[in-house]
Amino acid sequence: MRMWTLLLFVAFSSAAQTVVPVGHFESVALHSGGHVVVRQGATQRVTLISGDLRAARIGVREGRLVIHNAGRKHGRHERLRVEVVTPDLTAVSVSNGGTLEIADAFSAQATIAASVEQGGTIDIRPVAADSVVASVYSGGKIFTHPRRTLTASVRSGGNVTYWGNPLVTRSIRDGGVIVKGKPAHAGKPLSALDLGPNAIQPIKPIAPIH
């Protein structure tokens, strides 16, 4: 009965800053819009900052945390905003719009993969990864700062912008851009790089739960 009560609360609560219980995950995927901020922390935690869980599906599938924003389908227009805390991360992805960004410094790791399909934005500049694999298909943006190597591909439009001096392997088909960012922009917040009518506002970190 206690578990059933918890599940009902998660499914129907519309209050902001709701902790969503999920299983262990190694990567994060955002579908159909919204704003996800990933921070490094010792214990994994997923928190709804704003939006309605009745119009979102959040769960783990085969080690991947999937955040699916169904608000458009259900006529709920409040923007979905989620904070994810995890000690490590292997991959991130965005499809059909939305923004996923890494906040603050993220400790060194061997590799991270980032992919955008059908529009959206990913910012993984704070991740100190030796190797980055970045791919954009049919529109979208990825910002990254690899330490050693970057394997970047853009197909049917999109943009991969990188900083630093990595060894770059690039592939562009049917339009798109893979370009080195300006040094002056390396430390700018994403909101300053991704200007426009949908420019994002930063999510403040949530205090740990004791």
Image (cartoon, rainbow, N blue to C red):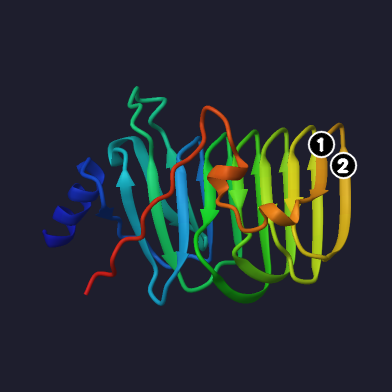
Q: Quadrant of the N terminus?
A: bottom left
Image location (x, y in percent) of residue 145: 70, 62
Left or right, residue 150 beside residue 109 = right
Closest to the observer, 1 or 153: 153
Q: CA distance from mark 1 to mark 2?
A: 6 Å
Above or below: residue 109 compared with residue 52 = below
**Rendering quarter of residue 76:** top left
Q: Relative to 143, say whether 98 is above or below.
A: above
Residue, far front: 184
Task: Tell me the SS state at disc 2.
Answer: strand
Q: Number of marks in the image?
A: 2
User: In which quadrant of the rendered view does residue 154 lie?
Assistant: top right
Q: Alpha-carbon neighbours of circle 1 within 10 Å: few (<14), some, or many (≥20)?
A: many
Residue located 53% across and 53% down the image: 101
The reply, left or right, for residue 10 in relation to residue 191 is left
Instruction: Name which residue lies at 66% across and 54% down.
Output: 114
| Residue at the spot of label 2 | 172
- Return the x and y of residue 86 as percentages of the image width and height: 45, 68
Indicate which disc residue 40 carries.
none
Residue 116 point in image, percent of width and height: 65, 44
Amino acid type, label 2: Ile
At 39% from the left and 50% from the top, the residue drawn is 82
Q: Are marks 1 and 2 in contact (CB under 8 Å)?
A: yes
Which quarter of the image is occupied by the C terminus? bottom left
Decide which of 142, 111 is in the foreground and name it: 142
In this view, the residue in front, 145 or 72, is 145
Q: Secondary structure at mark 1?
A: loop
Amino acid type at image mark 1? Gly
| Drawn side of residue 167 relative to residue 141, left or right | right
Residue position for label 1? 176
Residue sitting farthest toward the top:
75
Density class for disc 2 (Cα within 10 Å; few <14, some 14-19, many ≥20) is: some
